[in-house]
Every structure is written in structure tokens, then in C-alpha cells.
Image: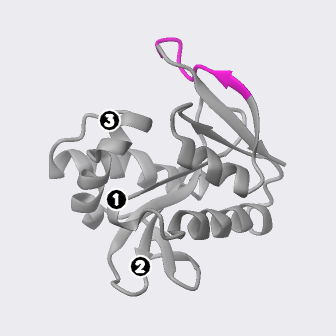
Amino acid sequence: MSIVLETPRLVLRHLEERDAAFILGLLNDPDWLRFIGDRGVRTLDGARAYLRNGPIAMYAKVGFSLFCVDSKTTREPIGICGLIKRDTLDDVDLGFAFMPLARGAGYAHEAAAATMAYARDTLALQRIVAIVSPENVRSIALLEKLGFRFERSLRLLPTDTQETLLYASE
């Protein structure tokens, strides 16, 4: 297990194929589907492929990606939080998502604040962005609490039918 960060209540570590069951549940959570989008992952094999081709490949390519967020109390995964380098954005972006039982307890803020400190202090990133669905008021509030400011609406891909909001922290 490759631990990247620790906070008082959380451990942020590299995602591994053994996290497939957790990822399968997270990617099919109604809020994930509503605010982030359907990734078409419906099986454990699909979740393992998502991990291999997504976060695990990005660790190898750029040295960071989304991290698994484990509760120190239960030692179980409760969410993901990390940094993503997308081909469609000039800057690295902060991403996070938590299981329903872990929402509303400040875990997302704790994980995201630690990730932002890591981005600045360890990776020396000056500018970090975040993309968010216009309807996702809780994530927008968290981004603003972290010091992000709205910049513009955009469509990440030409095929996107809905706009996404771009927030930035410098």
C-alpha cells in the first residue's frame, strides 16, 4: 500500500486493483452518475480495467492521480480525492467523490485541503483548477471554501451536451 498523505482522520493512498469493489460502488452511486457521469463500469472486471487505465496509468505517467481515501477509524475506503492531468485542460485539476455514508462529516474538505497542500508544497503547482457540474452545489461550496474562484463555463469535449463550470486556485 503506497500512502501519499495522512490527515487526523484519513489516509490517502494510491488506488490499486484490490479497490475494484469499492470503485464499482462509487462509480455507480446515484450522485456520481448525476454529477460526474456514467463511466459504463458495471462489473468487478470493468472496475479493475478502470483503475488500470485511469489512476494507475496516470501514477506511472505523471506521478499523481486520484487517491483512495481510507478512514483511519474503519480502515475502509470512503472516497477518492486527488489530482488529475487531463488532455482537455491546461492545468492539473482537483477531483473528489465520497460514498453517501461519508458525506457531511467534513472528510471531503479534509482530504481536499491536504491534497491542495501536497500539490503546492510537494509538486510545486502554482495553479490548480476544478471542474464541477453547475447543479452540484455542495462541491461548489467546498471549492469556494478551499479558495477556488469561478472562472468560466466550458465543454470539455466537443460532444458534451452540457456545460461544466471551471474553478481555479492560484
Q: Type of residue at label 3?
A: Arg
Percent coordinates x, y for residue 5 in the rendering = 58, 76
Q: Earlier in the sequence, mark 1 or mark 3?
A: 3
Percent coordinates x, y for residue 105 in the rendering = 48, 70
SS for callout 2: strand
SS for callout 3: loop
Q: Which mark is residue 39?
A: 3
Q: Type of residue at label 2?
A: Ser
Q: CA distance from mark 2 to mark 3?
A: 25 Å
Q: Nearer the viewer, mark 1 or mark 2?
A: 1
Q: Is residue 152 left or right of residue 96?
A: right
Residue linked to disc 2: 71
Q: Which mark is residue 100?
A: 1
Q: State which quadrant residue 93 falls in.
A: top right
Q: Which image quarter is the N terminus in? A: bottom left
Q: Residue at x 41, y 79 (%)?
A: 71
Q: Residue at x 41, y 62 (%)?
A: 79
Q: Type of residue at label 1?
A: Pro
Q: Is residue 73 above or below residue 145?
A: below
Tell me where the magenta segment starts and ends, as one range. Answer: 152-160
